[in-house]
Image (cartoon, rainbow, N blue to C red):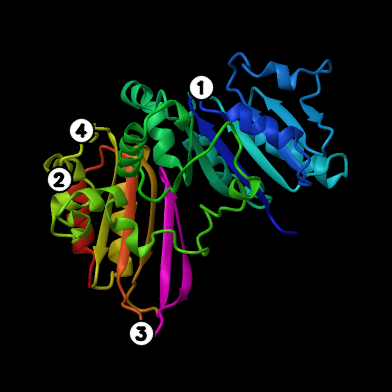
Amino acid sequence: MSLIPVTILTGFLGSGKTTLLKRVLHESHGMKIAVIENEFGEENIDTDILRTESTEQILQMSNGCICCTIREDLREALQLLAAKRRKGLVDFDRIVIETTGLADPGPVAQTFFMDDEIAETYLIDSIITLVDAKHADRQLDDRQEARRQVGFADQIFLSKTDLVTEGEKDELVHRLKHMNPRAPIRAVHFGDVPLTEVFDLRGFNLNAKLDIEPDFLQEDEHDHSHCDHEHGHCDHEHDEHCGHEHHEHGEHCHHPHHHHHDDDVKSFVYRAERAFDPAKLEDFLGAIVNIYGPKMLRYKGVLDMKGTGRKVIFQGVHQLMGSDLGPEWAADEKRESKMVFIGIDLPQDILRQGLDQCLV
Protein backbone atom coordinates (compact mmCIF):
# COMPACT_ATOMS: atom_id res chain seq x y z
CA MET A 1 0.00 0.00 0.00
CA SER A 2 1.47 3.38 -0.92
CA LEU A 3 2.36 5.89 1.78
CA ILE A 4 -0.03 8.75 2.55
CA PRO A 5 1.55 12.13 1.70
CA VAL A 6 1.57 14.78 4.43
CA THR A 7 1.85 18.55 3.96
CA ILE A 8 2.91 20.63 6.98
CA LEU A 9 1.48 24.16 6.82
CA THR A 10 3.18 26.76 8.95
CA GLY A 11 3.33 30.55 9.17
CA PHE A 12 2.77 33.38 11.58
CA LEU A 13 -0.65 34.58 12.72
CA GLY A 14 -2.40 36.50 9.98
CA SER A 15 -0.31 35.02 7.17
CA GLY A 16 -3.31 33.30 5.56
CA LYS A 17 -3.11 29.70 6.77
CA THR A 18 -6.77 29.66 7.76
CA THR A 19 -7.83 31.09 4.39
CA LEU A 20 -5.89 28.36 2.61
CA LEU A 21 -7.33 25.71 4.94
CA LYS A 22 -10.90 26.89 4.45
CA ARG A 23 -10.40 26.39 0.73
CA VAL A 24 -8.97 22.93 1.28
CA LEU A 25 -11.88 21.98 3.54
CA HIS A 26 -14.75 23.50 1.58
CA GLU A 27 -13.75 23.66 -2.09
CA SER A 28 -14.97 20.86 -4.35
CA HIS A 29 -11.53 19.80 -5.52
CA GLY A 30 -12.25 16.07 -5.68
CA MET A 31 -9.42 15.25 -3.27
CA LYS A 32 -9.97 13.42 0.01
CA ILE A 33 -7.89 15.39 2.50
CA ALA A 34 -7.63 15.05 6.26
CA VAL A 35 -6.68 18.32 7.95
CA ILE A 36 -5.08 18.10 11.40
CA GLU A 37 -5.17 21.25 13.48
CA ASN A 38 -2.17 20.96 15.77
CA GLU A 39 -2.97 23.39 18.56
CA PHE A 40 -0.46 22.57 21.29
CA GLY A 41 -3.07 23.35 23.91
CA GLU A 42 -3.67 26.92 22.80
CA GLU A 43 -7.07 28.47 22.45
CA ASN A 44 -8.16 27.59 18.92
CA ILE A 45 -8.43 30.81 16.92
CA ASP A 46 -10.31 29.11 14.11
CA THR A 47 -13.27 27.73 16.03
CA ASP A 48 -15.72 29.17 13.54
CA ILE A 49 -14.72 26.68 10.85
CA LEU A 50 -14.20 23.78 13.22
CA ARG A 51 -16.98 24.10 15.78
CA THR A 52 -18.69 20.79 16.38
CA GLU A 53 -21.16 19.77 19.07
CA SER A 54 -19.70 16.31 19.62
CA THR A 55 -16.56 15.53 21.58
CA GLU A 56 -15.32 13.48 18.64
CA GLN A 57 -12.07 14.97 17.35
CA ILE A 58 -12.75 14.01 13.75
CA LEU A 59 -15.24 15.97 11.69
CA GLN A 60 -16.32 14.88 8.20
CA MET A 61 -16.72 17.76 5.75
CA SER A 62 -19.28 17.90 2.95
CA ASN A 63 -16.67 17.69 0.18
CA GLY A 64 -15.15 14.45 1.47
CA CYS A 65 -12.49 16.16 3.57
CA ILE A 66 -11.97 15.40 7.22
CA CYS A 67 -10.96 17.77 9.98
CA CYS A 68 -9.25 16.54 13.12
CA THR A 69 -8.41 18.89 15.99
CA ILE A 70 -5.75 17.70 18.41
CA ARG A 71 -4.50 19.14 21.64
CA GLU A 72 -2.28 16.30 22.73
CA ASP A 73 0.02 14.23 20.66
CA LEU A 74 0.35 14.43 16.91
CA ARG A 75 1.53 10.82 16.79
CA GLU A 76 -1.67 9.60 18.46
CA ALA A 77 -3.84 11.58 16.03
CA LEU A 78 -1.97 10.13 13.05
CA GLN A 79 -2.32 6.60 14.44
CA LEU A 80 -6.03 7.17 15.13
CA LEU A 81 -6.64 8.43 11.58
CA ALA A 82 -4.68 5.50 10.08
CA ALA A 83 -6.63 2.97 12.19
CA LYS A 84 -9.99 4.51 11.22
CA ARG A 85 -8.93 4.49 7.57
CA ARG A 86 -7.96 0.80 7.73
CA LYS A 87 -11.36 -0.04 9.22
CA GLY A 88 -13.12 1.91 6.47
CA LEU A 89 -14.57 4.46 8.92
CA VAL A 90 -12.91 7.44 7.21
CA ASP A 91 -11.43 7.86 3.77
CA PHE A 92 -8.60 10.23 2.85
CA ASP A 93 -5.71 10.29 0.39
CA ARG A 94 -3.51 12.90 2.02
CA ILE A 95 -3.05 14.91 5.21
CA VAL A 96 -2.49 18.61 5.84
CA ILE A 97 -1.18 19.51 9.31
CA GLU A 98 -1.64 23.12 10.36
CA THR A 99 0.78 24.15 13.09
CA THR A 100 0.04 27.12 15.33
CA GLY A 101 1.53 30.46 14.40
CA LEU A 102 4.16 30.17 17.11
CA ALA A 103 5.13 26.58 16.42
CA ASP A 104 8.52 25.27 15.41
CA PRO A 105 7.87 22.86 12.51
CA GLY A 106 10.92 20.78 13.53
CA PRO A 107 9.29 18.44 16.06
CA VAL A 108 6.29 17.97 13.73
CA ALA A 109 8.62 16.89 10.90
CA GLN A 110 10.65 14.69 13.25
CA THR A 111 7.53 12.70 14.19
CA PHE A 112 7.63 11.17 10.71
CA PHE A 113 11.24 10.06 11.04
CA MET A 114 11.26 8.79 14.60
CA ASP A 115 8.23 6.57 14.85
CA ASP A 116 8.34 3.34 12.82
CA GLU A 117 4.58 2.91 12.71
CA ILE A 118 4.12 6.47 11.43
CA ALA A 119 6.98 6.10 8.93
CA GLU A 120 5.39 2.95 7.50
CA THR A 121 2.08 4.75 6.90
CA TYR A 122 2.93 8.36 6.05
CA LEU A 123 5.49 10.31 4.06
CA ILE A 124 6.17 14.04 4.47
CA ASP A 125 5.56 15.71 1.13
CA SER A 126 6.67 19.21 2.11
CA ILE A 127 6.70 22.01 4.65
CA ILE A 128 4.93 25.10 3.31
CA THR A 129 5.48 28.41 5.08
CA LEU A 130 3.11 31.35 4.59
CA VAL A 131 4.67 34.78 5.08
CA ASP A 132 2.61 37.95 5.53
CA ALA A 133 4.44 40.50 3.33
CA LYS A 134 2.99 43.45 5.23
CA HIS A 135 4.21 42.40 8.68
CA ALA A 136 7.03 39.98 7.86
CA ASP A 137 9.95 42.31 8.54
CA ARG A 138 8.82 43.04 12.07
CA GLN A 139 7.92 39.40 12.75
CA LEU A 140 11.27 38.18 11.43
CA ASP A 141 13.10 40.81 13.49
CA ASP A 142 11.24 40.03 16.71
CA ARG A 143 10.45 36.32 16.64
CA GLN A 144 12.88 33.49 16.16
CA GLU A 145 9.91 31.15 15.54
CA ALA A 146 9.12 33.12 12.38
CA ARG A 147 12.74 32.85 11.21
CA ARG A 148 12.77 29.11 11.93
CA GLN A 149 9.57 28.62 9.93
CA VAL A 150 11.28 30.24 6.93
CA GLY A 151 14.37 28.07 7.41
CA PHE A 152 12.32 24.87 7.42
CA ALA A 153 10.27 25.65 4.32
CA ASP A 154 10.26 23.67 1.08
CA GLN A 155 7.94 26.29 -0.42
CA ILE A 156 7.26 29.87 0.72
CA PHE A 157 3.99 31.61 -0.15
CA LEU A 158 3.93 35.41 0.29
CA SER A 159 0.50 36.75 1.18
CA LYS A 160 -0.68 40.40 1.27
CA THR A 161 1.84 41.54 -1.34
CA ASP A 162 -0.84 43.98 -2.58
CA LEU A 163 -0.35 45.92 0.67
CA VAL A 164 3.37 46.62 0.08
CA THR A 165 5.37 48.33 -2.67
CA GLU A 166 7.29 46.38 -5.29
CA GLY A 167 10.54 47.55 -3.66
CA GLU A 168 9.45 46.32 -0.22
CA LYS A 169 8.45 43.00 -1.73
CA ASP A 170 11.83 42.66 -3.48
CA GLU A 171 13.65 43.44 -0.27
CA LEU A 172 11.65 40.82 1.63
CA VAL A 173 12.26 38.17 -1.05
CA HIS A 174 15.97 39.01 -0.93
CA ARG A 175 15.97 38.57 2.85
CA LEU A 176 14.06 35.27 2.70
CA LYS A 177 16.43 33.88 0.05
CA HIS A 178 19.40 34.45 2.31
CA MET A 179 17.66 32.56 5.07
CA ASN A 180 16.49 29.73 2.82
CA PRO A 181 17.78 29.56 -0.77
CA ARG A 182 16.23 26.17 -1.55
CA ALA A 183 12.56 27.11 -1.12
CA PRO A 184 10.83 28.70 -4.14
CA ILE A 185 9.04 31.92 -3.13
CA ARG A 186 5.80 33.03 -4.76
CA ALA A 187 3.19 35.63 -4.08
CA VAL A 188 -0.38 34.44 -3.52
CA HIS A 189 -3.63 36.31 -2.96
CA PHE A 190 -5.91 35.35 -0.09
CA GLY A 191 -5.29 31.66 -0.38
CA ASP A 192 -6.05 31.82 -4.09
CA VAL A 193 -3.27 29.44 -5.03
CA PRO A 194 -4.03 26.36 -7.17
CA LEU A 195 -4.03 23.32 -4.91
CA THR A 196 -1.82 21.56 -7.45
CA GLU A 197 0.90 23.98 -6.31
CA VAL A 198 0.36 23.09 -2.66
CA PHE A 199 0.52 19.31 -2.95
CA ASP A 200 3.00 16.78 -4.33
CA LEU A 201 5.95 19.16 -4.06
CA ARG A 202 8.15 16.27 -2.82
CA GLY A 203 10.38 18.50 -0.74
CA PHE A 204 11.33 15.56 1.46
CA ASN A 205 11.65 12.94 -1.24
CA LEU A 206 15.32 11.95 -1.39
CA ASN A 207 15.15 10.50 -4.87
CA ALA A 208 12.97 13.15 -6.44
CA LYS A 209 14.52 15.85 -8.59
CA LEU A 210 17.50 17.43 -6.92
CA ASP A 211 16.17 20.68 -5.62
CA ILE A 212 19.61 22.20 -5.38
CA GLU A 213 19.47 23.57 -8.89
CA PRO A 214 22.70 24.67 -10.63
CA ASP A 215 21.56 28.29 -10.71
CA PHE A 216 20.35 28.17 -7.16
CA LEU A 217 23.64 29.63 -5.98
CA GLN A 218 23.30 32.72 -8.12
CA GLU A 219 22.14 35.86 -6.46
CA ASP A 220 18.50 36.64 -7.12
CA GLU A 221 17.76 38.12 -10.49
CA HIS A 222 17.19 41.72 -9.50
CA ASP A 223 20.73 41.94 -8.18
CA HIS A 224 22.19 41.10 -11.57
CA SER A 225 19.98 43.58 -13.28
CA HIS A 226 21.01 46.41 -10.94
CA CYS A 227 24.66 45.65 -10.22
CA ASP A 228 27.65 45.50 -12.46
CA HIS A 229 29.59 42.86 -10.58
CA GLU A 230 28.41 39.29 -10.86
CA HIS A 231 28.90 38.56 -7.20
CA GLY A 232 26.34 35.77 -7.34
CA HIS A 233 28.93 33.53 -8.95
CA CYS A 234 31.39 33.51 -6.09
CA ASP A 235 30.40 30.20 -4.60
CA HIS A 236 33.84 28.57 -4.36
CA GLU A 237 34.53 26.81 -1.12
CA HIS A 238 37.55 28.96 -0.31
CA ASP A 239 35.65 32.21 -0.34
CA GLU A 240 34.30 32.50 3.17
CA HIS A 241 31.95 35.34 2.45
CA CYS A 242 30.53 34.19 -0.79
CA GLY A 243 28.18 31.53 0.49
CA HIS A 244 25.42 33.88 1.40
CA GLU A 245 26.66 37.03 3.04
CA HIS A 246 25.69 39.04 0.01
CA HIS A 247 24.29 41.93 1.97
CA GLU A 248 27.76 43.46 2.09
CA HIS A 249 28.04 43.23 -1.69
CA GLY A 250 24.53 44.60 -1.97
CA GLU A 251 25.50 47.76 -0.21
CA HIS A 252 27.87 48.61 -3.06
CA CYS A 253 25.00 48.36 -5.50
CA HIS A 254 22.81 51.37 -5.45
CA HIS A 255 19.63 49.63 -4.38
CA PRO A 256 17.61 51.86 -2.15
CA HIS A 257 15.88 48.76 -0.80
CA HIS A 258 18.74 46.61 0.49
CA HIS A 259 18.79 47.04 4.22
CA HIS A 260 21.09 44.79 6.17
CA HIS A 261 19.29 42.26 8.36
CA ASP A 262 21.60 40.14 10.41
CA ASP A 263 19.21 37.21 10.81
CA ASP A 264 20.34 34.31 12.95
CA VAL A 265 18.74 31.86 10.50
CA LYS A 266 21.20 31.71 7.62
CA SER A 267 22.11 29.37 4.83
CA PHE A 268 25.35 28.51 3.19
CA VAL A 269 26.39 26.25 0.38
CA TYR A 270 29.40 23.96 0.21
CA ARG A 271 30.75 22.60 -3.07
CA ALA A 272 33.62 20.21 -3.73
CA GLU A 273 35.07 18.73 -6.89
CA ARG A 274 36.96 15.91 -5.15
CA ALA A 275 35.05 12.86 -3.91
CA PHE A 276 34.23 12.30 -0.24
CA ASP A 277 35.69 9.48 1.82
CA PRO A 278 32.46 7.79 3.04
CA ALA A 279 33.73 6.75 6.50
CA LYS A 280 35.29 10.14 7.25
CA LEU A 281 32.18 12.01 6.10
CA GLU A 282 29.86 9.81 8.15
CA ASP A 283 31.97 10.37 11.28
CA PHE A 284 32.17 14.11 10.73
CA LEU A 285 28.46 14.62 9.98
CA GLY A 286 27.56 12.41 12.95
CA ALA A 287 29.69 14.57 15.26
CA ILE A 288 28.35 17.84 13.82
CA VAL A 289 24.73 16.72 14.14
CA ASN A 290 25.42 15.65 17.72
CA ILE A 291 26.76 19.07 18.67
CA TYR A 292 24.76 21.45 16.47
CA GLY A 293 21.64 19.36 15.74
CA PRO A 294 19.17 21.63 17.55
CA LYS A 295 20.44 24.59 15.49
CA MET A 296 20.42 22.72 12.18
CA LEU A 297 16.99 23.28 10.64
CA ARG A 298 17.27 21.70 7.19
CA TYR A 299 20.30 20.40 5.36
CA LYS A 300 20.52 18.56 2.10
CA GLY A 301 23.14 17.47 -0.37
CA VAL A 302 24.01 15.62 -3.54
CA LEU A 303 27.35 13.94 -2.95
CA ASP A 304 30.10 12.34 -4.97
CA MET A 305 31.25 9.43 -2.81
CA LYS A 306 34.36 7.38 -3.45
CA GLY A 307 33.50 3.79 -4.34
CA THR A 308 30.12 4.29 -6.00
CA GLY A 309 29.10 5.35 -9.49
CA ARG A 310 25.82 6.69 -8.13
CA LYS A 311 24.98 10.01 -6.54
CA VAL A 312 24.45 9.88 -2.79
CA ILE A 313 21.59 12.09 -1.66
CA PHE A 314 21.32 13.04 1.98
CA GLN A 315 19.11 15.32 4.02
CA GLY A 316 18.18 15.99 7.60
CA VAL A 317 16.08 17.90 10.09
CA HIS A 318 17.78 18.74 13.39
CA GLN A 319 19.53 15.58 14.68
CA LEU A 320 17.81 13.22 12.24
CA MET A 321 19.71 12.52 9.06
CA GLY A 322 19.11 10.05 6.23
CA SER A 323 20.82 9.19 2.96
CA ASP A 324 19.96 7.24 -0.14
CA LEU A 325 21.59 6.17 -3.39
CA GLY A 326 20.40 8.33 -6.25
CA PRO A 327 20.82 7.93 -10.01
CA GLU A 328 24.12 7.05 -11.72
CA TRP A 329 26.47 9.90 -12.57
CA ALA A 330 26.13 10.37 -16.33
CA ALA A 331 29.27 9.76 -18.38
CA ASP A 332 29.48 13.41 -19.48
CA GLU A 333 28.44 14.85 -16.11
CA LYS A 334 30.87 16.72 -13.89
CA ARG A 335 31.07 14.83 -10.60
CA GLU A 336 30.88 17.29 -7.75
CA SER A 337 29.26 17.49 -4.35
CA LYS A 338 26.83 20.25 -3.43
CA MET A 339 25.40 20.74 0.05
CA VAL A 340 23.16 23.38 1.57
CA PHE A 341 22.89 23.98 5.31
CA ILE A 342 20.14 26.13 6.83
CA GLY A 343 20.43 26.79 10.54
CA ILE A 344 20.72 29.16 13.46
CA ASP A 345 24.19 30.68 13.76
CA LEU A 346 25.92 27.60 12.34
CA PRO A 347 29.74 27.84 12.44
CA GLN A 348 30.50 28.03 8.72
CA ASP A 349 34.26 27.86 9.12
CA ILE A 350 34.15 24.70 11.26
CA LEU A 351 31.77 23.01 8.83
CA ARG A 352 33.80 23.98 5.77
CA GLN A 353 37.14 22.91 7.27
CA GLY A 354 35.67 19.63 8.53
CA LEU A 355 34.08 18.83 5.17
CA ASP A 356 37.35 19.69 3.38
CA GLN A 357 39.12 17.14 5.58
CA CYS A 358 36.63 14.43 4.53
CA LEU A 359 37.60 14.73 0.85
CA VAL A 360 39.70 12.01 -0.76
User: Which image quarter is the C terminus in?
Assistant: bottom left
Up the image or down, 287 lies above or below 68; here it is below
Q: Which residues are magenta?
A: 309-331
Q: Which residue in the protein does label 1 denote? A: 13
Q: Judge left or right: residue 332 versus residue 99.
A: left
Q: Amino acid at mark 4?
A: His
Residue 261, quarter of the rendered image = top left
Q: Earlier in the sequence, mark 2 or mark 4?
A: 2
Q: Judge left or right: residue 222 versus residue 114.
A: left
Inter-mark Cα distance, 1 to 4: 25 Å
**Element type at mark 2:** helix
Q: Earlier in the sequence, mark 2 or mark 1?
A: 1
Inter-mark Cα distance, 3 to 1: 49 Å
Inter-mark Cα distance, 2 to 4: 11 Å
Q: Which residue in the protein does label 2 denote? A: 249
Question: Visible in this render: residue 73?
Answer: no
Inter-mark Cα distance, 2 to 3: 35 Å
Residue shown at 19%/62% (left/top)?
Answer: 356
Q: Which is more foreground, mark 2 or mark 3?
A: 2
- Which disc, if any, is residue 314? none
Q: Amino acid at mark 2?
A: His
Question: Visible in this render: residue 135?
Answer: yes
Q: Earlier in the sequence, mark 3 or mark 1?
A: 1
| CB contact under 8 Å: marks 3 and 4 | no
Q: Amino acid at mark 1?
A: Leu
Q: Which is more foreground, mark 3 or mark 4?
A: 4
Residue shown at 13%/59% (left/top)?
Answer: 238
Q: Judge left or right: residue 178 versus residue 45.
A: left
